[in-house]
Amino acid sequence: MITKGHDFPNITLVGVVSADTSLNIPDFRAGERTFQLMTQVSGRSGRGDTPGRVVVQTFNPQHYAIRRAKEHDYSGFYGDEISLRSDLGYPPFSRMVNLRISGIKKEKIAEDVKRIGVLAKKLSLHGIAGGKIEVIGPAEPPISQIKGRYRWQILLKGKDIKALHTLARNILTKTESDGIDIKVDADPVNFM
């Protein structure tokens, strides 16, 4: 509630409990989100004439997102984050398409997703992409079951969005949809 931008008067102390939690979310933007939240919540303390304090509980005080938020160092955070993303080939240095695959029968969806993963890797190496698209997965997302449906993901990563779309379209075309549902999410925001 405090991070949502509400202006509560006379707040002189803000506590952040388990700041590491958001760093452990399996998303390449975890550091960015942590920095943003900590910076935003820090701004809630000490508004007006009364000085404020921020207390942060963390097991990882040397993580660049926490350290840079403590220092109010946006430029330093950006430098750390953009360097990491460049090294790992994450956006903005690449584009992504997430294939979200779900089904009702646990064993069947596990078999189907393995087959789809093999197909995706084969098509990415020998198909239109010519090896320029990385196939990551298949893997279960952190929330592996919702409303009785078992879920898996396959992430396609590359620089050419047209090749990514073509690869995703080819995977959909060559995949039988007997009892499985495949959703395509271009430039995904959420990996949960």
Image: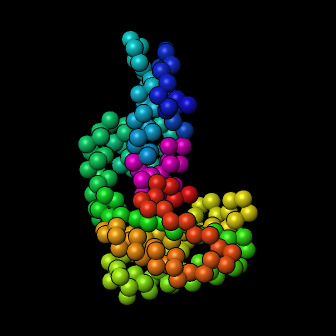
Residue 40 in the image: state x and y as whole percent: 42, 33
Tell me the quarter of the image containing the C terminus. Answer: bottom right
Q: Nearer the viewer, residue 21 or 118?
A: 118
Residue 134 in the image: state x and y as whole percent: 39, 75
Image-quadrant location for residue 159 = bottom left
Determine whether 130 is above or below 70 in the image: below
Residue at the outermost front position: 173
Lateral position of residue 122 relative to residue 95, left or right: right
Image-quadrant location for residue 28 = bottom left
Residue 81 in the image: state x and y as whole percent: 32, 53
Instruction: Name the residue at 41% across, 27% down.
Output: 43
Examine the structure image and report whether residue 103 is included in the region drawn in magenta. no
What's the coloring here?
Answer: rainbow
Q: Nearer the viewer, residue 59 or 182?
A: 182
The answer to whether residue 29 of the structure is visible from this angle is yes
Residue 56 in the image: state x and y as whole percent: 48, 36
Examine the structure image and report whether residue 30 is included in the region drawn in magenta. yes
Tell me the quarter of the image containing the N terminus. Answer: top right
Lateral position of residue 67 relative to residue 142, left or right: left
The stretch in magenta equals: 18-32
Determine whether 20 is above or below 161 in the image: above
Instruction: Name the residue at 29% across, 54% down.
Output: 82
Instruction: Name the residue at 42% across, 84% down.
Output: 123
Q: Report how many numbered discs are placed on residues in the image.
A: 0
Q: Nearer the viewer, residue 71 or 186?
A: 186
The answer to whether residue 84 of the structure is visible from this angle is no
Image-quadrant location for residue 121 = bottom left
Instruction: Name the residue at 67% across, 67% down.
Output: 150
